[in-house]
Amino acid sequence: MEVVIAPADELAVLAAAAIDALLRRKPEAVIGLATGSSPLKVYDELARRHAEEGLSFAQARGFMLDEYVGLPPEHPERYRNVIEREIASRVAWAPDRVQGPDGLAADLPAACAAYEAAIDAAGGVDLQLLGIGTDGHIAFNEPGSSLASRTRIKTLTKQTREDNARFFDGDVEQVPRHCLTQGLGTIMAARHLVLLATGKQKAEAVHQLVEGPISAMWPGTIMQMHPHATVLVDDAAASRLQLGGYYRQTFASKPAWQGL
């Protein structure tokens, strides 16, 4: 696991540069898309590169990490709409090339199985963007999730619903109680994981993610087992890291050609 500590704007540029390099090397690459606050600056930088430097998403595929269950198609916080608004429409990404789990399906288990099959049929995810919750969840794999789990329905914790209430006018009662989410096993099958975290409120989760024991109580810790995992954090999110000085030293000494 590589840990990079830098200001949030620099982290976004690093993540976007990794996606840029991938798409120029492999135009048909499969990108895993996250929602929430963490990837927004990355999407801004990708949109800039598309507009100013010709970065193309025309042949690429996108798969979302998760989706709320039951939000109507027009709801602005339905994750399919969030992804369309924040990245797909800004880079001329055709709607049929970006997929998410169907939170309105009549048969949710079947929809989850179909989503797993769609990812497999696309050849798997090349680069997966991730954020992390204050309780250590990645995607919507809440504490206690199976470390081998696949796409499924999950009940959101009180903490997660309170954290996400800011997207629903501050009203936690508007936040759905259930979601469909890629499982930890699904996420771990991606070839490169890139996680971003900023702010003091993420410090304990980042500490556990990077330096704690692997445990279902902190689901993100499964990333320690991934052969190519990158963790991008600002100073505040890194404030609990015991080896913060070492992470800074190793990144400063990294050959420029190596990338993330």
Image: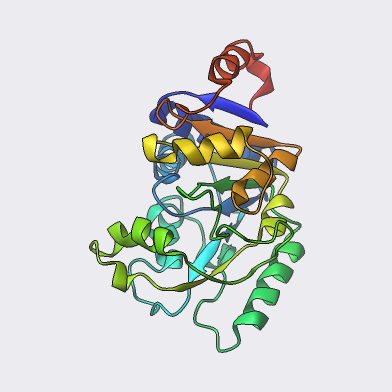
Locate residue 161: give its quadrant. bottom left
Q: Using the rendered view, name the quadrant where residue 199 is placed.
A: top left
Describe the colour scheme in one phrase.
rainbow
Task: Return the x and y of residue 210 as percentages of the image width and height.
Answer: 61, 34
Determine if residue 219 is in view.
Answer: yes
Q: Is residue 162 left or right of residue 157?
A: left
* Position of 5 relative to 174 (above/below): above
On screen, residue 237 above or below 113: above
Instruction: Give left or right: position of 250 versus 225.
Output: left
Q: In front: 140, or 102?
A: 140
Picture quarter with the N terminus = top right
Can you give x and y, in whole percent of width and height, for residue 77 in the image? 36, 66
Q: Quadrant of the C terminus?
A: top right
Q: Residue 232, how many percent across, how many down?
A: 53, 32
Residue at 46%, 66% in the rendered image: 80
* Front-lying residue, 161 or 117: 161
- What residue is rendered at 39% in x and 53% in y? 86
Q: Residue at image x 54%, y 14%?
A: 245
Q: How many marks?
A: 0
Q: Is residue 97 left or right of residue 160?
A: right
Q: Where is 249 relative to 80, above or below?
A: above
Q: Would residue 21 be visible to someone looking at this image?
A: no
Farthest residue to the left: give it: 169
Q: Is residue 240 above or below residue 208?
A: above
As rendered, which of 114 and 29 lies closer to the eye? 114
- Residue 10 position in % (x across, y down): 44, 26
